[in-house]
């Protein structure tokens, strides 16, 4: 292992001021390493090193943390201050948050000693030390190299947040005191991505829907359409027996925000052309600007818009209309009358084309691809009709054979055909190949698509027969991605939505922010709004500041409703957390104090859906400029005695007495005087001219010049190295031990003066 002269093992170059506050064991390690050469590990991108503090004061440093090569990269990992009683693993792992075991890890738990993707570090003298594991160095230090890739061994850092971590080895798997985590990012990511923070009760960015309103102003709702131009909610309705005082059949036009009725078209031409009260069974599609084309029982094809007193329409010959959709021109509609498919002129009711299929009653049109998909639930068949030739061009089996009719819908974006049969949804691609089967606990009765987000919405209705143990009287809304068919939102229970009084229908606002679902049995339409748990979009980063400097931590998150934020601080290595009083803004700004060195901070975002936290970051506070100059001056004064690396280490010991200010430090000079005798006095005199830092340099001159037997002034001829003084490594070690005693004492006294500060 190698270290920069004047720094402890594992401390990045240029971070000397941090080292000066280290406890005495680190000083011993630095002195030992100055005289005992070791091989240096290969460093990766030194431009992005990062250091984190563990729950017991451990320091972990990773040489590269951003822009890592997904195909593989070597990184250097260094640590100090680890306990000498517990073995640890060093690896790239999934970051599961505070007090959660980092797992899985690249390379797994290396107990063979042959892995290059993880390292096993054990206390000196451990039975596994040797070929299987490396031993900690003095002061609980280590310096290793691991090879990491973006994917492998069940870990995919493109999908989950990953960190380079230390964790207790397999002999103390439940021990979280050794967990130190540094988020890393491969090329194209930011540290901690993906994940958007640590979801506390639900994963960050979880999408769900909740009921915002219930509309009971449209009788027994049978079908829905949210008009793309006028934004009005059109409802095809039948009469609701529960309201005997009024016949609610017809086409209702509602305000989609509050459900108030804007218009009600109850009259449509019958078989003789005379107007009569008519239900609106199925809505074919929108008219330009406003209005819809719809089917009214039994064979009527009508059209109407908000404000009309009655619908215009035609009465078809033949059997009952079982389905309807827009035609190939603005003036036509496609109509199913059982197994007969026709294209009809809306103005006259004349069939321009007719096709008789082997069977079926329901269909879905895909005008973008010139196809109609006709479903024969009784025979368990799906037929493809080419719209150009108006012929059947393919027939496909519905797995499971005949089943209860649900729905047939096409995804406008992909051309996939979604067929609801019994308690399943069968998804066929545009060529007729079955690509996915979705299974629910209820009956699949309606589907709709949002092309803006690539989402499919499915309503599953309960059977409504409570004598069947499979029924509970409640339906479900599910949301899926249309590419991977994975759940895209939490399932939502629809209480009371059962199929005894008819099938549900739904309409989705473009973008998916609002969804409308009908419940015919209850005579209501439920307006659902989308919610999203907080997702962190900007996370704070580790900060290093000087005593007295203003620092700012910033975090941002998105969610619906808009999340609130509060900042939290941990003074014990993330074991416990407390709110920072009054810190409820995205930016947390305060003056850095030495008492806050090693404190960890995080932002917690909340809304109605859940709570999400950012990864904890560490604040490192170095002495103010005056304090740093004093320490460095001490080293320079020491250089006049020895001009070597030992003097640099001596300045480290002296700084223990100069943390709080640039004044004199009686503790530091007294201890040094004891160690160095008259040499300490001589060395201290010239240093005194430089202020308190001269005393810090006094410690160094004792180690550098005093061991050689010269005074502070005479030591100039020493040549500046341990070899020039003629001292052995052991002699330096003994001198360092005495210095450590002084440094620890000063450190403890200084700490008592700052404990309790936030």
Image (cartoon, grey):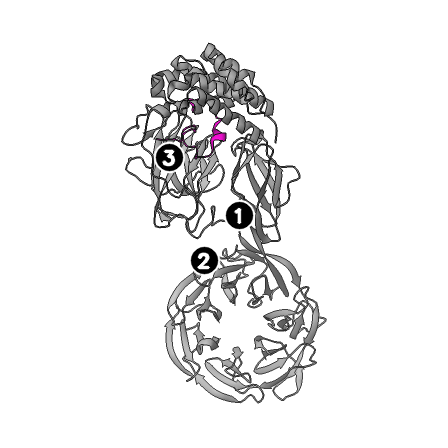
Residue 146: x, y in percent? Answer: 34, 40
Observer-nearest of 429 and 532 = 532
Q: What span is in magenta? A: 1-27
Secondary structure at badge 1 equals loop
Quadrant into which the C terminus falls: top right
Secondary structure at badge 3 equals strand
Residue 620: x, y in percent? Answer: 53, 34
- The CA distance from mark 3 to mark 2 is 35 Å
Asked whether residue 281 is drawn in magenta, I would say no
For residue 486, the mark is: 2
- Name the side, left or right, on which 341 lies relative to 280: left
Residue 647: x, y in percent? Answer: 43, 22
Going from N to C along the chain, the mark reached first, 1 or 2, is 1
Main SS, magenta residues: loop
Q: Which residue is mark 1?
A: 202
Q: Which residue is mark 3?
A: 89
Vertical comparison of 536 with 255: above or below: above
Is residue 80 visible from the viewing direction of this image?
yes
- The CA distance from mark 1 to mark 2 is 17 Å
Observer-nearest of 617 and 611 = 617
Asked whether the residues under the numbered discs 3 and 1 touch, taking CB atoms below 8 Å apart as contact, a structural biologist would say no
Q: Residue at x 41, y 68 (%)?
A: 428
Secondary structure at badge 2 equals loop
Residue 202: x, y in percent? Answer: 53, 47
């Amino acid at each position: 292992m190698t270290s920069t002269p004047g720094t402890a093992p594992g401390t990045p170059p240029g971070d000397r001021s941090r080292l000066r506050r280290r406890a005495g064991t680190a000083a011993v390690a630095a002195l030992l390493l100055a005289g005992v050469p070791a091989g240096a590990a290969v460093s990766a991108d030194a431009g992005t090193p990062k250091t984190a503090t563990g729950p017991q004061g451990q320091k972990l440093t990773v040489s590269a943390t951003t822009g890592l090569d997904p195909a593989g990269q070597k990184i250097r990992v260094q640590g100090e201050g680890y306990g000498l009683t517990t073995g640890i693993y060093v690896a790239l792992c999934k970051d599961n948050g505070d007090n959660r075991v980092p797992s899985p890890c690249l390379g797994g738990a290396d107990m063979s000693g042959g892995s290059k993707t993880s390292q096993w570090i054990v206390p000196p003298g451990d039975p596994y030390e040797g070929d299987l594991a490396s031993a900690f160095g003095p002061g609980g230090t280590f310096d290793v190299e691991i090879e990491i890739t973006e994917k492998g061994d069940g870990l995919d850092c493109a999908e989950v947040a990953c960190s380079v971590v230390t964790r207790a080895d397999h002999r103390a798997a439940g021990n979280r005191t050794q967990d130190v985590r540094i988020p890393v990012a491969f090329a194209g990511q930011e540290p901690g991505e993906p994940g958007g923070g640590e979801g506390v009760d639900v994963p960050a960015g979880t999408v769900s829907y909740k009921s915002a309103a219930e509309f009971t102003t449209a009788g027994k709702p049978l079908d829905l359409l949210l008009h793309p131009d006028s934004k009005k909610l059109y409802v095809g309705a039948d009469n609701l027996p529960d309201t005997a005082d009024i016949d609610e059949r017809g086409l209702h036009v509602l305000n989609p925000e509050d459900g108030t009725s804007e218009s009600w078209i109850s009259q449509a031409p019958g078989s003789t052309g005379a107007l009569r009260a008519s239900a609106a069974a199925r809505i074919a599609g929108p008219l330009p600007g406003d209005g819809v084309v719809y089917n009214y029982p039994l064979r009527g094809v009508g059209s109407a818009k908000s404000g009309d007193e009655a619908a215009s329409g035609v009465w078809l010959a033949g059997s009952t209309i079982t389905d309807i959709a827009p035609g190939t021109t603005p003036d036509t509609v496609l109509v199913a009358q059982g197994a007969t498919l026709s294209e009809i002129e809306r103005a006259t009711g004349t069939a321009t084309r007719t096709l008789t299929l082997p069977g079926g009653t329901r269909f879905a049109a895909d005008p973008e691809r010139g196809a109609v998909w006709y479903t024969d639930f009784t025979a368990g068949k799906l037929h493809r009709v080419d719209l150009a030739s108006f012929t059947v061009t393919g027939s496909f089996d519905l797995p499971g054979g005949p089943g209860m009719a649900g729905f047939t819908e096409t995804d406008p974006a992909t051309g996939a055909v979604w067929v609801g049969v019994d308690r399943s949804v069968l998804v066929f691609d545009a060529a007729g190949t079955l690509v996915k089967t979705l299974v629910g606990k209820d009956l699949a009765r309606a589907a709709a698509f949002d092309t803006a987000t690539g989402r499919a919405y499915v309503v599953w209705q309960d059977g409504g027969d409570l004598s069947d143990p499979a029924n509970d009287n409640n339906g479900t809304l599910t949301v899926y991605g249309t590419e991977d068919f994975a759940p895209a939102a939490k399932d939502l229970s629809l209480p009371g939505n059962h199929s005894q009084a008819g099938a549900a229908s739904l309409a989705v606002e473009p973008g998916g922010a609002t969804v409308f679902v009908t419940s015919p049995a209850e005579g209501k339409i439920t307006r659902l709004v989308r919610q999203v748990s907080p997702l962190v979009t900007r996370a704070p980063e580790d900060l290093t500041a000087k005593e007295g400097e203003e620092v700012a931590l910033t975090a941002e998150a998105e969610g619906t409703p808009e999340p609130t934020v509060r900042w939290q601080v941990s003074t014990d290595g993330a074991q416990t957390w407390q709110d920072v009083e009054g810190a409820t803004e995205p930016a947390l700004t305060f003056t850095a104090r030495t008492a806050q060195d090693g404190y960890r901070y995080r932002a917690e975002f909340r809304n109605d859906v859940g709570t999400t936290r950012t990864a904890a970051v560490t604040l490192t506070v170095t002495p103010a400029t005056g304090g740093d100059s004093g320490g460095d001056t001490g080293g320079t004064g020491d250089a006049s005695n020895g001009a070597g690396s030992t003097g640099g280490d001596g300045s480290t010991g002296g700084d223990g007495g100069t943390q709080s200010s640039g004044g004199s430090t009686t503790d530091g000079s007294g201890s040094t005087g004891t160690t160095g005798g008259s040499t300490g006095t001589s060395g201290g005199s010239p240093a005194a001219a430089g202020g308190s830092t001269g005393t810090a340099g006094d410690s160094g001159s004792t180690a550098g010049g005093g061991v050689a037997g010269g005074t502070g002034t005479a030591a100039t001829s020493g040549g500046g190295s341990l070899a020039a003084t003629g001292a052995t490594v052991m002699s330096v070690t003994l001198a360092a031990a005495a210095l450590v005693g002084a440094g620890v004492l000063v450190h403890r006294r200084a700490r008592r003066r700052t404990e309790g500060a936030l």
